[in-house]
Image (cartoon, rainbow, N blue to C red):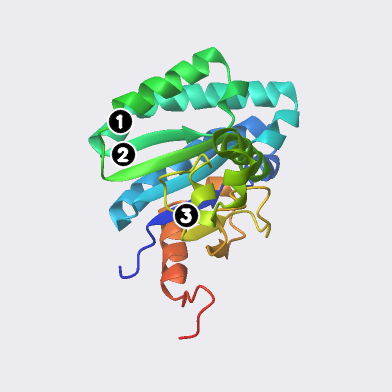
Amino acid sequence: MNNVPQHVSIIMDGNGRWAKARGRERVYGHLEGVESVRAVTEAAVEAGVRYLSLYAFSEENWNRPQAEVDRLMELMMEAIRNEVKTLMDNGVRFVVLGNRARLSATLNKAIDDLMEKTSACGRMTLIVFLSYSGQWDILQAMKKAAAERGSEGVRDMTAEDFGKYLVTSGIPDPDLLIRTSGEQRISNYLLWQCAYTEFVFTDVLWPDFRKPEFRAALETYASRDRRYGKVK
């Protein structure tokens, strides 16, 4: 396939609605959503995508019912334990970005262990945004820049300088952002980084989003003419 995006990011939406339509608890949708993560990761590797990022849990998601939050954290732990060998066998580096201070010590340790084990993998980087919000990211970047540079240094900063203080420093901005479930909003996600990202919205709920749907989104992206404000 020509014109493969270097970085694809996905807002995984619709787990709860998928489960409700089947008369099941929301957690059932999250469980099935894990299978979509596996399928899409494989499809991204096969297509030659270099970075795949997933919006797994936002800062706002902490306001959900505690039982659902607890189960989501358990699912993350289970996924980490189950996917170690698969990620390493496929050359996938695992990275978690977000406000990790809100995560449990047990989960943080599991994350650190998997990040270390896959640190040498170079075929693709899988980034999971956990306890993340775009506004939080910009605010923490501003605070770090002010502490390091002082008021005079901040005044002279460029957009490129500022980007180095975001949690995504060293990671290229998304070329393509996919959102499932029919919603057409960014939901406080990568607000700075998506300045020139191409968007694809699909009505497919996340648990039903698998390899064919991912490849269709890549084809849509390939048909776009990215001008970055210029005239071609």
> Residue 175 or 54: which is nearer the viewer?
175
Query: How far apart, in angstroms, are the residues tagged by discs 2 and 1?
Result: 7 Å
Which badge, 3 or 2, is on the more N-terminal residue? 2
Residue type marked 3: Asp
Residue type marked 2: Val
Which badge, 2 or 1, is on the more N-terminal residue? 2
Residue 101: where, in percent of width, then height? 59, 22
Secondary element under disc 2, as helix, strand or loop, is strand
The answer to whether the residue labelled 3 contacts the one labelled 2, judged by CB atoms less than 8 Å apart, is no
Which one is closest to the eye, mark 3 or mark 1?
A: 3
- Res 209 visible: no
Query: How far apart, in angstroms, are the residues tagged by discs 3 and 2?
Result: 19 Å
Asked if residue 9 lies left or right of residue 43, the reply is right
Residue drawn at x 30%, y 25% as measured from the top left: 117
> Residue 57 or 99: which is nearer the viewer?
99
> Residue 93 or 22: which is nearer the viewer?
93
- Res 21 visible: yes
Residue 199: where, in percent of width, then height? 56, 64
Which badge, 3 or 1, is on the more N-terminal residue? 1
Q: Residues within 10 Å of mark 1 (few under 14, many from 20)?
A: many
Q: Which residue is mark 3?
A: 173
Q: Which residue is mark 1?
A: 118
When the figure is inspected, residue 170 is found, relative to residue 183, above or below; the finding is above
Q: Which residue is mark 2?
A: 92
